[in-house]
Image (cartoon, helix red, strand yellow):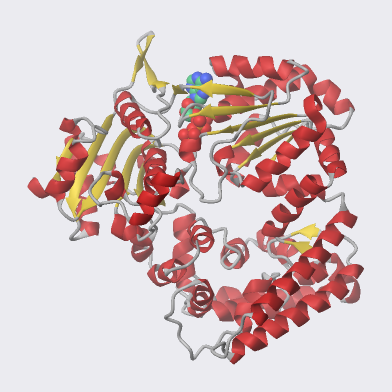
Amino acid sequence: MTSRAGKPDTPADIQLRDLLDADASTGFVMVSGAGSGKTTSIIKALDHLRKTRGLYLRQRAKKIACITYTEVAVGEIWGDVGNDPLFHVSTIHSFLWAALKPFQADIASWVDRRLDQKIADTEAKVAAFTSRTHDKTRVQAAADIQRYREQKLRISSVDRFTYGVGSDYPKGILGHDDVIRLSTELIRTLPLIAKVVGQRFPFVFVDESQDTAPDVVEAFKAISEELGSKFCLGFIGDPMQKIYTAGAGAIEPLAGWKTIEKPENFRCPVAVLNVINNIRAGGDGLAQTGGKTELVGEERQPVQGTAKLLIVPKDDRSGRLAAARQWLADRHADPLWLSDEPEADVKVLVIAHRMAASRLGFGGLYEAFHDKTSDGLKDGFDDGSHWSIQPFLKFLMPLVLARGTGDHFEAMNLLRRFAPSLQREHLRANALPSILKELDERVNALAESCGAISTVPAFEALRHLRDGGMFQLDDRLLTAMAEYDPSVPHTEPGDAAALQKLLHTPLRELWGHRTYLEEQSPFATHQGVKGAEFSRVLTVLDDEEGRHNQFSYGKLFGITPPSDNDRANLREGNETTFDRTRRLLYVCCSRAGKDLAVVFFADDPAEAYAAIAGLGLFPAEDIHNFAAV
Ligand SMILES: Nc1ncnc2c1ncn2[C@@H]1O[C@H](COP(=O)(O)OP(=O)(O)OP(=O)(O)O)[C@@H](O)[C@H]1O
């Protein structure tokens, strides 16, 4: 175990250890704010269990599961626990698949039911067609039903289902969404499965629990209810940092569970801690204590830091942003505010990717995915997880890069991992050398035509992947490709149009998007910085840029009046725009380990200044109206 396990104990760590030592414990919910060291607490708990129960669990081939949100976090925790196989550290998808994959017969019958459901859903859609329904839509629906029926016949010959990027039932591949859907359903409806999973993983910790899907939370609770004190389940999270609409938020403890509070903040200096406590005061009111300290001589002293709120007019956004950075550099005598180099540790947090998108050359693609599309599509695009862009991000671009640098090993790895033509079932019937030769030619063609400045439409690249058996495309993408017509530009809004627009998009835009996602620019989005920490944080608040009616800083600051919908939500106790915006602001501001600047783009800076100053979020002397400077 690394130094994290050796960090000083907080009262929460001691409480958690006592709970883990008590054989009658069934579960806990740990609620703790930003920078409170949640990961440290988890590592300490894992370390404790290894010492107290490691031998017992190992002898019985049982594991302690630690589930977290991103692959990066998984890697960090793995490093901290020294890759000890006593632990199963993974994202939720990988965990659920690892737990469920032994139940192949149940999975096969779930897939069969799922296809029945798809047929029924499409038939219901057909029944609702009117005389205005396009012929193309009718033909597509009929083809879908036919395809599902054929798939139903073919799945009986699947030997084994596996977990892949996009579902392809006849080939036995289940995608992310299906893995979650099937595992939560099977755990909840089949007590035997719940029992076996819980017996194999008698301790399960779920980090970032606020963004875990409610179905997943319910599935884990079902295991807890089935096994009682033979299973210990812990949710560790912060409801104030819930970012995804589909997240569970605060987790309701089951009877007998303990709630553990962790009020310290180790990350933020005094000035920033005051601001985030003020923001949170309007939410659940949790106030954090402590703050970042540093050794001065022999003594640990609080770090003061800075927190500024700059109100700027909405005219020239890029120019204003540059001016704000210049002002901060001068004001704090800190030229690093102007640097885009990673070492400067400056992060510019933009509400939506729009500003970054136009700067990095993927404005068109960004618009396509944000033009009256569903939250799932927007969020999936914004964090790169959407099935429609995964073939590029996970496969095509890494492959082109690997070929470009002559890294044959990596190129082969990618092909082995993703190319259906190299999968075992396919190989039996075909000669490997000829497949490899064809793949090699196809990779060369990709490398030549699909590089970072390529104007080739995404459709052509996908067709190349599909026809060459290089990557298993999601069914929904294949359907969209069947409808693609290069001579018909799409301007209408919505999800279906977004897919068509994607197919028309030149690859260079997808490369721009990748630069952004890979954090190769100083920009990041508010949503994308969960869990991260930077010395200098510049948070841009721009309602217009966001165009996301889920968030409104104008409303949060009392400048824009609430809509009828907001009022209704408030009355009915539903989640409101205010709640969501407050949480986002909290997440962003709490990333700062040294200096924080919030830049608010205002229609009327004087009016905004008066409204914001009255809220008391920032000390009056730290609020600056740039229009008046
Ligand atoms: N017990 C501790 N004593 C001293 N420092 C600590 C302790 N626990 C964590 N820290 C430090 O506090 C900082 C924040 O920790 P960490 O990122 O784990 O917090 P977190 O709760 O996951 O934050 P967030 O919810 O904001 O993502 C890190 O720099 C970490 O090294």
- Indicate the position of residue 149 as horizontal and vertical percent values: 81, 77
Point out the residue furthest to the left here. 628
Q: Going 77% across and 63% down the picture, which residue do you hit?
A: 173
Residue 604 sits above or below residue 196 on the image: below
Q: Residue at x 66, y 81 (%)?
A: 126
Would you say 282 lies left or right of 392 here? Answer: left
Residue at 55% of width from left, 51% of height from top? 246
Q: Position of residue 209 (x, y in %)?
A: 59, 38
Rendered image quadrant of residue 303: top left
Q: Quadrant of residue 315?
A: bottom left
- Above/below status of 303 relative to 528: above
Q: Is residue 145 above or below residue 230?
A: below
- Front-lying residue, 370 or 163: 370
Choose between 425 and 628: the one closer to the eye. Answer: 628
Question: With 201 as the anchor, is 321 left or right in this view?
Answer: left
Q: Quadrant of the C terminus?
A: top left
Viewer-nearest residue: 71 or 34? 34
Report whether residue 168 is seen. Answer: no
Measured as percent of width and height from the top left, residue 33 is found at: 47, 30
